[in-house]
Image (spheres, rainbow, N blue to C red):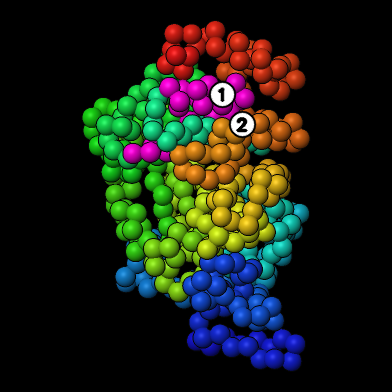
Amino acid sequence: MLYRSDFAGERFSFDSLAAVLACASPARSGDALAGVAAQSAAQRVAARAVLADLPLRHFCDVALVPYETDEVTRLIVDSHDATAFAPLSAMTLGDLRDWLLLPETDALALAHVSRGLTPEMVAAVSKLMRNQDLIVVAQKVRVTTAFRNTIGLSGRLSTRLQPNHPADDPRGIAAAVLDGLIHGVGDAVIGINPATDSVPGALQLLTMLDEVRQRYAIPTQTCVLTHVTNSIEIIARGGPVDLVFQSIAGSEAANRGFGIDLALLREAQDAALGLGRGSVGHNVMYFETGQGAALSANAHHGLDQQTMEARAYAVARAFDPLLVNTVVGFIGPEYLYDGKEILRAALEDHFCGKLMGLPMGCDACYTNHAEADQDDMDTLMTVLSVAGCTFLICVPGNDDVMLSYQSLSYHDALALRAMTGLRAAPEFEGWLSQMELLGPDGAIRCLDHGAAGLVRRLAGSGLAA
């Protein structure tokens, strides 16, 4: 099918819906690398004009990746909820944008249509929106999940405590965990990226974290971000797996590059549910995504990286995860060149994930060879908090010395909570109060006082060693 639009006295033609979507995307280095980006601002505006006039039903009729050869497409098509889609079925994409921005389109209305929205629809509508629009709509969406605490409640911002160590040294990890806890970080998950991905290594780290969690009744989840097959094996050995982690992408071929398919994810979910380790809920999956992952695996099927990213959210949605986050600047400047591109991508990912009903978080991060710095991350963490982000990732001193990239620090979480009034998950907040880390106003106490109280209570444990 040929798509045409006139703009500024020039006629633009697009030979596929994929081409329209790619040319409508804000400029970014990954799409230029893939050879799918708009060649001019005028072409970009023309593509957006085409999108605005497309009926939403058109996205149900056109498969961007063939149904017969891609299980992610089959998942999207076969799980589409026609009843949830019905209120939107007569709309164009431009109508959908206008409806999303209406004040009366509230959290309940958005929840009712969420399962009727395909990833291609939400990716497309995001391309018609300014950053402000993405923030306004995402802020209205409320997605709540639970395991040992309740994540995503109104007025709350959770954090992942990421205590990575370049040699997986338990004492170094313990120091980073203690540092995070006295800053009130860690209610989303205490999650370690292992330097060496093996079953014995992951089991050792999981056991250490779980012993401390149990001894001091910390109402949070622990996770070693090992490959899903390792998690299945650890569960079979009786290991203390709270959450099953896996990186995912938006096509079958890209997921194959991660060594996974949908059946394997289902096997892992069933194994984790069988442990019954949750106390207030049973969301047991943790997924990470990122724009550019499919392109880096040469598995993007000619699609722009943001549309491929949104397709990954269909995979996540099928498994009712506790947490999903985009590691937005981690893959590098080949895909998101500078602070502006990282900011826009983060807002798109957050908007699309929330609109599809996911508990969407973000690693506000960048690599050292990107045209970005910590000022860009300060801006990003602030706008994501305003947009209702479910959780953010925090590492000691902004610097992950194992993965060699820059993220947010524990102090950044303190600053955000002071600026916005957002608080930790209620169960975790109650624990912080018991540990004398919270003042009467709900803010973290003077760190010297809090550290002394917590160290006294952790005396003799692995964390105080």
As drawn, 150 above or below 141: above
**What residue range appears in magenta?**
171-196
Q: Which mark is residue 179?
A: 1
**Front position in the image: 447 or 227:** 447
Circle 2 residues within 10 Å: few <14, some 14–19, many ≥20: many
Q: CA distance from mark 1 to mark 2?
A: 8 Å
Furthest toward the front, the residue is 369
Circle 1 residues within 10 Å: few <14, some 14–19, many ≥20: many
- Horizontal and vertical percent for residue 134? 68, 57
Residue at mark 2: 410
> Identity of the amino acid at label 1?
Asp
- Horizontal and vertical percent for residue 130? 72, 63
Mark 1 touches mark 2? (CB < 8 Å): yes
- Horizontal and vertical percent for residue 291? 51, 59
Drawn side of residue 219 relative to residue 46, left or right? left
- Horizontal and vertical percent for residue 300? 43, 68
As drawn, 393 above or below 96: above
Q: Secondary structure at mark 1?
A: helix
